[in-house]
Image (tube, rainbow, N blue to C red):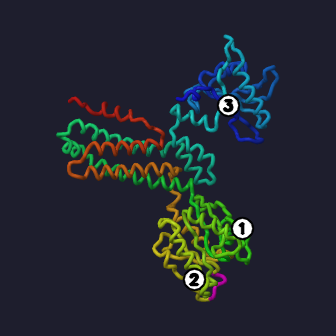
Amino acid sequence: MLARHSDPIVAIATAPGRGAVGIVRVSGKAIGALVRHLLGKDLKPREASYLPFKDAKGAPIDHGLALYFPGPNSYTGEDVLELQAHGGSVVLQLLLARCLEAAQAPGADGAPVLPGLRLAQPGEFTERAFLNDKIDLAQAEAIADLIDASTEAAARSASRSLSGDFSREIGELREALVHLRMLVEATLDFPEEEIDFLQKADAYGQLDALRDQLGQVLARTQQGALLREGIKVVIAGQPNAGKSSLLNALAGAELAIVTPIAGTTRDKVQQTIQIDGVPLHVIDTAGLRDSEDEVERIGIARAWDEIAAADAVLFLHDLSRMGEAGYVADDLEIAHTLAERIAPNIPVIDLWNKTDLAAPGAQMQPLAPLAGRQGSEASLSLSARTGDGLDAVRQRLLQVAGWQSAAEGLYIARARHVEALQAVGAHLEEAHAQLNVPGPALDILAEELRLAQTALNSITGEFTSDDLLGVIFSSFCIGK
């Protein structure tokens, strides 16, 4: 560990503000002397003691509960002291200052009671839990995700990741990958028998099984990342198509100003909504048109910037104006620009608004520039004012986002986990291609498998390759 990780640390462990209870936490090696100096006695491990918390002159700061957790059986893996007092900010600051003061007081031998005690940095208690092998990196991230969870589905999924469900799946992948690497590495020592040896060990079948297993884990990880990250959805279209009304309808609140005056929206309005527990960051933008108004032109330029960075675009049309040749021409021009400016893999959903105002028999017209793009398979009609058709819009958004269902057992994940698993998949594909050519270059095959394991290890924070050596020497008698 780095030098700073050997320092004892202290911090207020509860959120700022008033509360019934507040906690000051100390973590470090051998903090028993501090416990005695602060509280006047030793504490029984993992047993709450009610007593006064006194200042340096013996006057009580507060009365509360003290708990002592000797390492390694603690959250951080070090000795931990928790002082649970009333949750006023002044009380907690006084207790924090008292801990720092007591640490520098001379002990029985004249040396400071707990030299080096300092304020903890953000996340440092959890960082130490990771460094002391109490949790892995994915579990550490799940703690933050559980705290930040805004829906029941996200909270339950984060709890599963924290309990180790995700890490266990990564561990199973790693075990299979290490075993395959073991075969290839051992075969490198017997080049005259390499093909027969790999065939007898079913290295081909093991690699195929590993790729299938990875595909299943990746699919669940993508769902978990979507549950945490959500997607950015931009509403685009001509002025007065009903973009602000659609945002308000999806959010269930009057967030954006709605008027019949073209150009009312001049800057983006953003709101995060939840659909089946999936967060969607919806952005209303300025109407797309040519304008002489400098402020509106800036808003339109920002609208195109948001569109270019979107994960999905809701292209809104006014069904009540489909008989106007100029309106249709402007829609086609916007469609051409959309096709040019955004990546082909970004879904564009055609929405035809104002069904309540449209003339009888008004038809939704497909826009050729966007034909064949994901999300444009079928247009949707709705009325943002009455709410008719909104459920279909919500379901289409979930569909283009890639959400399948809030399946039981889903764990939360992050974009970096998805990227790491995709990197593993790319290396396994290269390994598969190498293994299926005549006279495979085993050194290249071994390197691809090593890189796959490195990418896999980055998820849980296990970067060492010493485990591979242990498996090789314990499972194979190389000299036989």
134 lies left or right of 388: left
Secondary structure, mark 2, is helix
Q: Considering depth in this image, is 326 or 281 the residue closer to the camera?
A: 326
The kind of residue on which mark 2 rests is Ala
The residue indicated by pointer 3 is: 119
Membership of 330 in magenta stretch: no
Task: Please provide percent x and percent y for residue 413.
Answer: 52, 50
Task: Please provide percent x and percent y for residue 155.
Answer: 59, 50
Mark earlier in primary sequence (2, 1): 1
Residue span colored magenta = 355-359
Mark earlier in primary sequence (1, 3): 3
The residue indicated by pointer 2 is: 329
Q: Considering depth in this image, is 336 or 280 the residue closer to the camera?
A: 336
Q: Identify the residue at image location x=54%, y=43%.
A: 162
Dot label at residue 411: none
The residue indicated by pointer 1 is: 256
Task: Please provide percent x and percent y for residue 30.
Answer: 60, 21
* Distance in Å between CA atoms under marks 2 and 1: 27 Å
Judged from this view, the residue extending furthest toward the left is 192
Q: Identify the residue at image location x=63%, y=46%.
A: 147
The kind of residue on which mark 1 rests is Ala
Q: Badge 2, how many Cα within 10 Å: few under 14, some, many 20+?
A: few
| Labels 2, 1: front one | 2
Vertical placement of residue 322 versus 371, above or below: below
